[in-house]
Each structure stands twice: as structure tokens, then as C-alpha cells.
Image (cartoon, grey):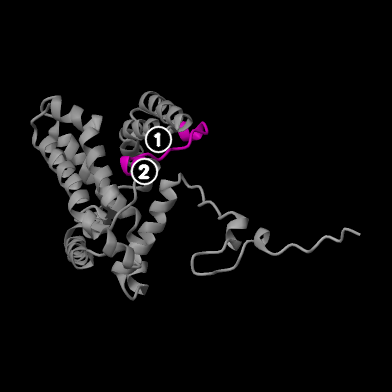
């Protein structure tokens, strides 16, 4: 096993995340009573304020320079390369979720874009009708039936929860591209560069959206929490809508004496004459 700083960092993230599941499990009862499932709100808001400060003095200005200096086609190509590097993790999680058709699409995308797409610069796979798939270990845990746990705002990573925090730690630790950079000799800077560019590119894509949201929101923290949950729910279900309740369940009598099912109503007497 590698003893590089990034490997140790990822290992610490994983240990911290797993520990968080244990230490925060006691908050589950409190979270059930909290409509927003945010029992750690004071801590989360402190991390949120720190990120907003860092964004104001450094991240957003760098993202604005990035947009001004790199033309849209160049930024698009950079995003393609970053997404292509993430395909092995997507493939592994699709397999773990039993999504074999999605896994097949992902590996086909990776092979096509890595070769004819020159390392992902050109997204030939999408042009051929092979849409990019989603897959991370937080999503895998969701498929396995693990609940999300309390809301968490992670420094530099943003809105999350206990389950997705663990998922991020596992994905970071298992990332084959990062492992290859740190064990190829002298290429560690490529991994740091990849992480940095990925964050700046993500911020650059959302400059106007976040500015408008912050301008109109009464409570930016609460608004971001709500929107991030909606977006994550869509990702967890691969874009599919949540299933509607069965029609008959709408009429089942609950423990508090709600309405009865149609089948429970008295049946009219049958005239035997």
C-alpha cells in the first residue's frame, strides 16, 4: 500500500467518515424530530461561513479569471477530461449496484473517449448516443438501503450527509487514477492539479446561478441545503422520479383512525329472494 501523503489523507478521510457514522448515530432520534434533519446545524453553519469566506476571497475570483482566460470550448474539453478520469469509479459503483447495463455503457465510454477522444478531450461517446452515467459509493450505499443520516456541510466539499460523506471517502481512497499518479513517480502534482481544476471548473459553471440564489435567498444556507438535497435525490435515482404511492394505500386506515380502505366498507346485503 502506498504511503504517500494523498493516500494517507484519503485514508484519514475514510476513517473519519466511518467514525462519523458511529458517533453521529446517536443523533438519529434527534434528527427524526428535526424537520430539516440538520441536528448539527451550528457546526454546519460554521463550516458554511468558512467556505463562503474562502469563496469570496479566493475561489470565486479564480473561477472568474478561469472563465475569462479559457474559452468555452477549452473549458468543455477540460471538463470532458476530468469526467473521463472519473469513469472507472462510476463503472465500479454501477457494478456494485447491479446496474450492469449502465456499467457496460460506462466502460464503452471510457475506452472510446480515452482512445479516439484523445484521453477524453473529445466526447465521442456522447455523440454516439452513449450518455454519461452516474455512480458513486454514496449512491451505492443508497441502493443497498443505507439511510442518509444527518445533513452535513463539509469544508471545501459542500452539502452532504453522513452516508455520502462515507461514500466520498471510499471513492477517494479507491480512485485508480489518483493511485496511479502517486505511484508513477514524480506525478503527484498531477493529482493535486486535477483536484484543483475540478473544483474551479465546478465553481465556474455555477457563478451566475449561485450569485442569483444568494441575492434572492432570505437564508442562503437553508436554500442551498434544500436545493442540494433535491439535486442529490435525482442523482441517487439516476434521474428517475420517485415512485408514487399505490392507489389503495391512500385509503388504508392508519393507527390514528384515518380513512378506511374501500374494501373495508360495509358491503350491501344481497337479496336472496
Between residues 92 and 141, which one lies in front from this camera angle? Answer: 141
Is residue 181 part of the magenta span, yes or no? no
- Left or right for 1, reference 219: left
- Of 189 and 162, nearer the camera is 162
- Front one among 194 and 86: 86
Image: 56 above or below 167: below
In percent of width and height, residue 247 lies at: 62, 56
Span shown in magenta: 125-142
Residue 211 seen anywhere in this rendered image of the structure: no
Per the image, label 2 sits on a secondary structure element best described as helix
Q: Residues within 10 Å of mark 2 (few under 14, many from 20)?
A: many
Q: Give the residue at mark 2.
A: 139
Query: Is the Cβ of the residue at disc 1 closer than 8 Å to that at disc 2?
Result: yes
Image quadrant in which you'd find residue 12: top left
Residue 270 position by quadrant? bottom right
Q: Quadrant of the N terminus?
A: top left
Q: Position of residue 50 (x, y in %)?
A: 16, 63
Q: Residue at x 18, y 62 (%)?
A: 47
Q: Residue furthest right?
A: 273
Q: Secondary structure at mark 1?
A: loop
Q: Nearer the viewer, residue 249 or 171?
A: 249
Residue that badge 1 annotates: 97
Disc 1 crowd, CA 10 A, few/some/many (<14, 14-19, 20+): many
The disc label shown at residue 8, or none = none
Earlier in the chain: of badge 1 and badge 2, it is 1
Amino acid at each position: 500500500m502506498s504511503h504517500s501523503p494523498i493516500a494517507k489523507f484519503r485514508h484519514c478521510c475514510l476513517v473519519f467518515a466511518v467514525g462519523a457514522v458511529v458517533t453521529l448515530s446517536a443523533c438519529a432520534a434527534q434528527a427524526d424530530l428535526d424537520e430539516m434533519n440538520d441536528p448539527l446545524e451550528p457546526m454546519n453553519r460554521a463550516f458554511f461561513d468558512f467556505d463562503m469566506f474562502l469563496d469570496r476571497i479566493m475561489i470565486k475570483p479564480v473561477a472568474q479569471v478561469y472563465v475569462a482566460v479559457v474559452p468555452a470550448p477549452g473549458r468543455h474539453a477540460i471538463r470532458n477530461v476530468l469526467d473521463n478520469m472519473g469513469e472507472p469509479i462510476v463503472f465500479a459503483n454501477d457494478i456494485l449496484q447491479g446496474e450492469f447495463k449502465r456499467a457496460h455503457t460506462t466502460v464503452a465510454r471510457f475506452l472510446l473517449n480515452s482512445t479516439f477522444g484523445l484521453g477524453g478531450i473529445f466526447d465521442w461517446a456522447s455523440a454516439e448516443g452513449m450518455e454519461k452515467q452516474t455512480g458513486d459509493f454514496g449512491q451505492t450505499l443508497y441502493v443497498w438501503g443505507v439511510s442518509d443520516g444527518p445533513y452535513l456541510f463539509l469544508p471545501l466539499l459542500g452539502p452532504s450527509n453522513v452516508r455520502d460523506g462515507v461514500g466520498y471517502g471510499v471513492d477517494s481512497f479507491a480512485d485508480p487514477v489518483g493511485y496511479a499518479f502517486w505511484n508513477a513517480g514524480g506525478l503527484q502534482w498531477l493529482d493535486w492539479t486535477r483536484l484543483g481544476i475540478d473544483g474551479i471548473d465546478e465553481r465556474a459553471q455555477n457563478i451566475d446561478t449561485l450569485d442569483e440564489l444568494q441575492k434572492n435567498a432570505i437564508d442562503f444556507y437553508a436554500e442551498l441545503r434544500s436545493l442540494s438535497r433535491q439535486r442529490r435525490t435525482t442523482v441517487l435515482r439516476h434521474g428517475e422520479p420517485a415512485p408514487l404511492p399505490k392507489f389503495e394505500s391512500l385509503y388504508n386506515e392508519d393507527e390514528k383512525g384515518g380513512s378506511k380502505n374501500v374494501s373495508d366498507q360495509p358491503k350491501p346485503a344481497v337479496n336472496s329472494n
